[in-house]
Amino acid sequence: MADITPVLERADANLPQSLERLFDLVRIQSISTDPAFRAECRKAAEWLAAELKALGFEASVRDTPGHPMVVAHHAAEKASAPHLLFYGHYDVQPVDPLNLWDAPPFEPGIKELEPGRQVITGRGTSDDKGQLMTFVEAVRAYKETHGVLPCRITILFEGEEESGSPSLKPFLEANAAELKADYALICDTGMWDRETPAISAGLRGLVGEEIIVKAADRDLHSGLFGGAAANPIHILADILAGLHDETGRVTLDNFYDGVEETPSEIKASWETLGRTAEKFLGEVGLSIPSGEKGRSVLELTWARPTAEINGITGGYTGEGFKTVIAAQASAKVSFRLVGNQDPAKVRESFRAYVRTKIPADCSVEFHPHGASPAIHLPYDSALLTTAKAALSAEWPKPAIVIGMGGSIPIVGDFQKMLGMESLLVGFALADDRIHSPNEKYELTSFHKGIRSWIRILDALAG
Amino acid sequence: MADITPVLERADANLPQSLERLFDLVRIQSISTDPAFRAECRKAAEWLAAELKALGFEASVRDTPGHPMVVAHHAAEKASAPHLLFYGHYDVQPVDPLNLWDAPPFEPGIKELEPGRQVITGRGTSDDKGQLMTFVEAVRAYKETHGVLPCRITILFEGEEESGSPSLKPFLEANAAELKADYALICDTGMWDRETPAISAGLRGLVGEEIIVKAADRDLHSGLFGGAAANPIHILADILAGLHDETGRVTLDNFYDGVEETPSEIKASWETLGRTAEKFLGEVGLSIPSGEKGRSVLELTWARPTAEINGITGGYTGEGFKTVIAAQASAKVSFRLVGNQDPAKVRESFRAYVRTKIPADCSVEFHPHGASPAIHLPYDSALLTTAKAALSAEWPKPAIVIGMGGSIPIVGDFQKMLGMESLLVGFALADDRIHSPNEKYELTSFHKGIRSWIRILDALAG
């Protein structure tokens, strides 16, 4: 381990320029789910490759059937240093409903939430452009200070994370030799709170499915046909309402296969974190846990599977009223998985259940949207222990190891396809409004995030 | 009764020009539910007033807080002739989804469906522009032939029928003396089949209600919050799925108050019409009646109340997938009423039911969209008997008296506010796709509709 004080000072001095660079990246409207923004996704990839080249990386934009990847390589000062693969994603979520944004989503800025608390605003500032730039700026500070890097670094940025990463696995497979490293670093997770950094050691899996219920071959007038013709919205409501029983459990056959009860000592450690339902839900205007009865919010979001409806549409949804019986209605449904739940079996069980609810003269279409099992990382690895100490040195409070409600399928891919253990460190906060209007990233997350990576790189090099 | 042969011949000779005039009216995009088409609604009103003036009516466009009314008056040849108020509406339904139209909805044309069967295509050709123009063209043929009219005629065209007619009652109230006639003629209904004209003697009432379920104060990431935070789409699905029991009955408290069983002789007469579920639903690609079990489709659509979901929306509904828990979700729900069901009580019962389903940390908003009770017209009045004979003279098969699933609230308003009995005659067909893409009106409906009104006017004058 070298003296990193000058590197940290360099990062501090660079901060205004680091922010300008992040703003440039946020201005690129790289919404991956919407084909209209295809060119913007490429632009983001090219912007990143150019930045990395300027830092001395051998960087390139690699085409895929979807949005391109950015791959970059940089050697370490010493050949004995570990090889790290850093992963992030440059694509962002759609921005609708646009009218709920206080400022245009792709015009980033700094806003003072309260005295001494500044945030960076704009789509992608937290998920994931701000996060990936903490690493790029850490590398920059190191390089500018010492002219070398402490570890061998490969960077992989993808542009389809928000669309289920369809091109990722084939890309990893085709480029395994180039991408295989000693460890993967993934920066797409959050802090415990504004003072406490966190390393995520458990992630829920995800199965996404869109269903389209089809009834009559055209929209019908509800006066002429109402009471006699099947209404696909009724059918859909019945399907969705039946997904949970009165205790909040998911009703699908064999859904809980592979789900184990969380050990009581783990539950006890979570109790001490003080995340009550009132506090956790209070931040978003709610207060009552809605899922399985008798479980804490940490257990519900970290250790229990769910069925959620992410979107629904059917019939007339414009202004005013239209007395129509729709020809079809659709919903996007997702399942968060834990333990050893099998994504393929969950999807099949859902489809079987849906089919039982479709009248004989109606039909249903299924469209899969991604599938990944849950992941558990070892709590006591050297990687995790080293990173924990480095983070604890930077932040006011020591780092903690937590579960995670979200899904980062790439962790499983790295494990299975490249045999790499991942370290999940990120600086987002629960109130960052990722995927929502008015997304933000704490200025402190960005600044101390850069400093955190400097410390982690240095510690891993040693 | 005069010799109407020359009038009918005149109508036949006028047909090409009558069609051109209808096309002109259909080209005006008078969608009343969408504020973007406000100017088009006025344009339709002005077009109609100008046509009526040219026919010798004293016609004017009258402002309302919403879209304007057209009112026109014309004296009868003899002072002893009855005074008739003809009602129609110039506004049309929205046209989405636009991609399902074979031709642009506001570019009318003639299409040959099969040899000898031509239809007029375009939004509003059947509902209600084509229908109201049958009357205007009947009047034209009479006037052009005889220089006079057989009855005193007042015409009232409104532009808000598809939006619940908010301005109609106040307008009737403010202009009662001017609008009061001996009978009202309403042309917004259908034929029994292509050969059999029909007079509608029963109409279901309608209560419309939009509900907005609100949960968190922002959209949430389903990974971070899924399993713990209330999902408004789940709550909405649960509300909507609970509206019916397993026998298809509506579950709301006291919903069936005022609903009487249809007399068995009436049911028996409906049986003879041969409208089986297979035939009726087969026309729209369905086969199984979906409402209350054990009742015929005629009973379900003419004599039973319903609860229908006309639209639903919440969360992410664009392309791809977004793992979001929405802040809110909404549905447009309507109830068709029969017998003496009280619209206000039905609405209140629905709201009370919905409130029981809203968790304590969530909320619901209600937006009413129209309310009208069911209507029954006497089966044996002179007006109905006279019209029945006139229609039977024109069409291949005798006219029949039927029930109606739809709601025409103005029938109740005419009855209560102006003390007028209404005659409901129209020439639409069940497969006209009103409110749907590819709306059409049979050329025969238009042509023989014009001739039918000539016969009815003449018969009523006598």
Image (spheres, coloured by chain):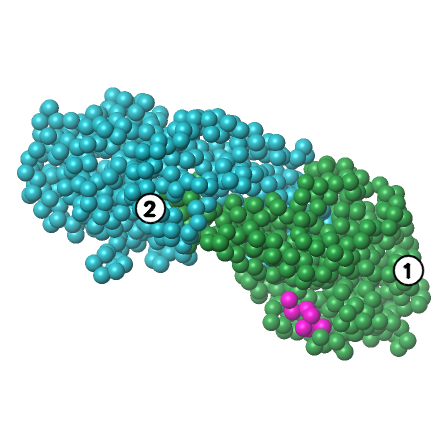
Chain colours: A cyan, B green
What residue did someone put label 1 on? B380
Say which of A23 and A388 sits in front. A388
Residue at (46% x, 40% y) in the render: A292
User: Principal SS element in the magenta part?
Assistant: helix
Across and down, in percent, residue B387 comes to 88, 60
**Is residue B170 magenta-colored?**
yes
- Closer to viewer: mark 2 or mark 1: 2
Q: How many marks?
A: 2
**Is residue A434 magenta-colored?**
no
Say which of A27 and B170 sits in front. B170
Residue at (49% x, 49% y) in the render: B232
Looking at the rendered structure, the kind of residue marked 2 is: Arg
Q: Quadrant of the N terminus of chain A?
A: top left
The subunit carrying tag 1 is B
- Side of A160 relative to B31 (left or right): left
Residue at (57% x, 64% y) in the render: B38
Label 1: few (<14), some (14–19) or many (≥20) C-alpha neighbours in 10 Å:
few
Across and down, in percent, residue A424 comes to 26, 35
The subunit carrying tag 2 is A
Q: CA distance from mark 2 to mark 1?
A: 73 Å
In the image, residue B157 sits, relative to residue A365, either above or below, namely: below
Say which of B330 and B176 sits in front. B330
Say which of B397 and B166 sits in front. B166
What residue did someone put label 2 on? A275
Q: Quadrant of the C terminus of chain A?
A: top left
Across and down, in percent, residue B299 comes to 79, 47
In the image, residue A5 sits, relative to residue B354, either above or below, namely: above
Secondary structure under the numbered disc 1 in the rendered image: loop
| Residue A355 shows in the view | yes
What span is colored magenta in the figure? Answer: B166-172
